[in-house]
Amino acid sequence: MSSLNLDDFTDLIERPDGGVRRDAEARRERQVVPPGSLGRLDELGEWLAAAQAAVPVRAIERPRVVLFAGDHGVAGLGVSARAAGSADDLVRSVLDGASPVSVLARRLGVPVRVVDMALDCDPDSLPDEVVRHRVRRGSGRIDVEDALSLEEAEAAFRAGVAVADEEADSGTDLVVLGDVSVGGTTAAAVLVAALCGTDASVVTGRGGRAIDDLAWMRKCAAVRDALRRARPVLGDQLQLLATVGGADLAAITGFLLQSAVRKTPVVLDGVVSAACALVGQRVAFRAPDWWLAGQSSGEPAQAKAFDRMALEPLLSHGVTVGEGAGALLALPLVQAAAALAAELPLAPSGPEGAEGEALAGPEGE
C-alpha cells in the first residue's frame, strides 16, 4: 500500500488570487485601449496577474521547457509510427539541438530540461542530469499488464513533485510542459477514456506521426483492452497511473500538482500532458486554475480532456510533433499579454480622460 496521500493536494492547492484578478480587471478598464479590444490577451494578462498575485503583472522572464521521457510497452503492438523502445533517439535529438522544440527554444531563448523516467536504454548513454530520476527501464504493456508497480508509480510521482520544486526554487516563473515518449499517446487515451467514461474509439487518435488505418485499429484495440483494466481502479488515481499510465505520466501528474502548490503557471502541450492534467483534476479540483492549454494538437483525447477541465487552447495549428513544441509556440502570446497588461498607459482621469478613452477606440470611436 502506498504511503503517498494524494488527498493532501486538495488542501495544499489554492486558486489564483481572485482579489488580485479583480484589481487587474479594474486596471485594464482604465488603460487607453478599450477593454475587450485585445481579445484573449486581456484574459491572459488578468490570469497571470492572479497567478503572480501582482498588479501590474510581472514580465515572464524565466520560462523553461520541461519534458518527461519514457518508453511504453504497448508500443510493441505496432500502435505507433515509431519503433518500440526508441524514445531515447528522440531525447538525444532534443539534447543535440536538432528537434523542433530545440530549434524553437533556441530562437526564444528558453532552456529545455529533459527528465528520463522510463526510457528503454542504458542509462549510461545519457547525461546524469537526464537519468537521475529514472524509475525503471520502459513501462509495462498496459493492455495485459500493469505499467508499473504501485511502489514505482509512487516513486515516479514523487520524482515529478521533486522536479516541480527544483524549478520553483530556481526561479522558473512559467513552465512549458511536454513529453518525449513512444506509446505515450495510447496510455494517455486510456486515462482520458477512463476518467471521462467514453469508449476507445472516441479518444484514439493517430499519434505524433500519423499512423495508418491498420495501426489505428490496433491502437483502438489496445486502448479498449487497457480500459477494461483501468475501470476497476478509477477511485485510486495513483493505482490508475500504475495500472494504465507509465512512469513518465505519473511524474507529469506529480509535477502538475506540485507546480500548482508552488503557484507556478504551466502551459500544457499535447495529449499526454492533457491526460495527466485530467488525473490531477481528479486529485485536486482547483489545480487546473494554474494551467493553460497551449495548443490543440487534433488528438481527440486531448480535446476531451481540455473540455472536461474547461481549458481553451491558445493556438490551433495542429502541431503533433510532441516534445512541447506546440505549447512553446504559445509562449510569445503569454509574454505579449503580460507586456500589454503592464505597459499600456492608463487613461487620464476626468472629463478630458473620458474623451481620450473614446478617441482610442476602434476607428476613432
Image (cartoon, rainbow, N blue to C red):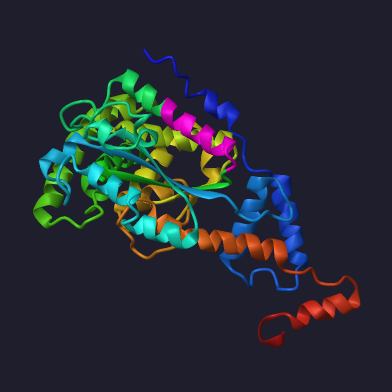
Question: How far from the left and from the top, in percent, is residue 255?
Answer: 46, 35
Question: How far from the left and from the top, in percent, is residue 62?
Answer: 57, 50
Report whether residue 295 is seen: no
Height in image: 223 above or below 153?
A: below
Q: Residue furthest bottom?
A: 363
Q: Residue furthest right?
A: 350
Residue found 62% across the figure and 40% down from its top? 15
Apparent side of residue 148 relative to residue 108 in the rendered image (left or right): left
Apparent side of residue 245 relative to residue 4 in the rendered image (left or right): left
Q: Is residue 166 magenta?
A: yes
Residue found 58% across the figure and 60% down from its top? 335
Q: Quadrant of the N terminus?
A: top left
Residue found 57% across the figure and 38% down from its top? 170
Q: Is residue 233 magenta?
A: no
Height in image: 305 above or below 344?
A: above
Report whether residue 178 is seen: yes
Q: Main secondary structure of the magenta part?
A: helix
Question: How far from the left and from the top, in percent, is residue 41?
Answer: 59, 64
Height in image: 281 above or below 107?
A: above
Magenta segment: 158-171
- The residue closer to the viewer here, 362 or 157, is 157
Residue found 58% across the figure and 46% down from its top? 173
Image quadrant where residue 365 sits: bottom right
Image quadrant where residue 234 sits: top left
Question: How far from the left and from the top, in percent, is residue 322?
Answer: 32, 52
